[in-house]
Amino acid sequence: TSLVIFSTSMLSGCYWPIEVMPEFMQKLARFFPQYWAIRGLLDTVVGNSGIETLIMPIGVMILIGVLFYAVSLIVVKAQASSEAGLNA
């Protein structure tokens, strides 16, 4: 899991500005929650914006969390049914 976290953090702009990456990597970064966390932080702290700038990043992170949760439920259910089939 550390490899996944490290690589997605690199793609999301946690270690260097996303602007230095190629265009396709910048588009790919938007699929990771770290991108949205960094974007919200930068918009609020560096951009000197208000709390309303956090609505979009937080909403996207919640949506990503719900999607990952749904995928994990599907995977666990599939594993449980395959184990039940092996035990029968």
Image (tube, rainbow, N blue to C red):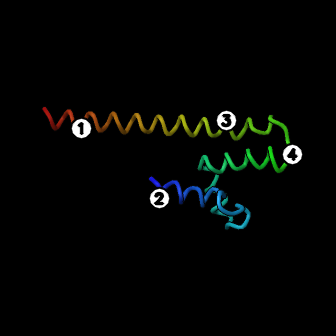
Percent x, y of residue 52: 80, 34
Q: Quadrant of the C terminus?
A: top left
Residue at 37% in and 39% down: 75
Circles 4 and 2: CB atoms closer than 8 Å = no
Residue 69's disc is none
- Closer to the eye: label 3 or 2: 2
Residue 48's disc is 4
User: Given the current orientation, which residue lies at the most extreme right position?
Assistant: 48
- First in sequence: mark 3 vs mark 2: 2
Question: In terms of image quadrants, where is residue 54?
Answer: top right
CA distance separating discs 1 and 3? 35 Å
What residue is shown with label 3? 59
- First in sequence: mark 4 vs mark 2: 2
Question: In terms of image quadrants, where is residue 12?
Answer: bottom right
CA distance separating discs 4 and 2? 33 Å
What residue is shown with label 2? 3
Question: In terms of image quadrants, where is residue 83?
Answer: top left
What residue is shown with label 1? 82
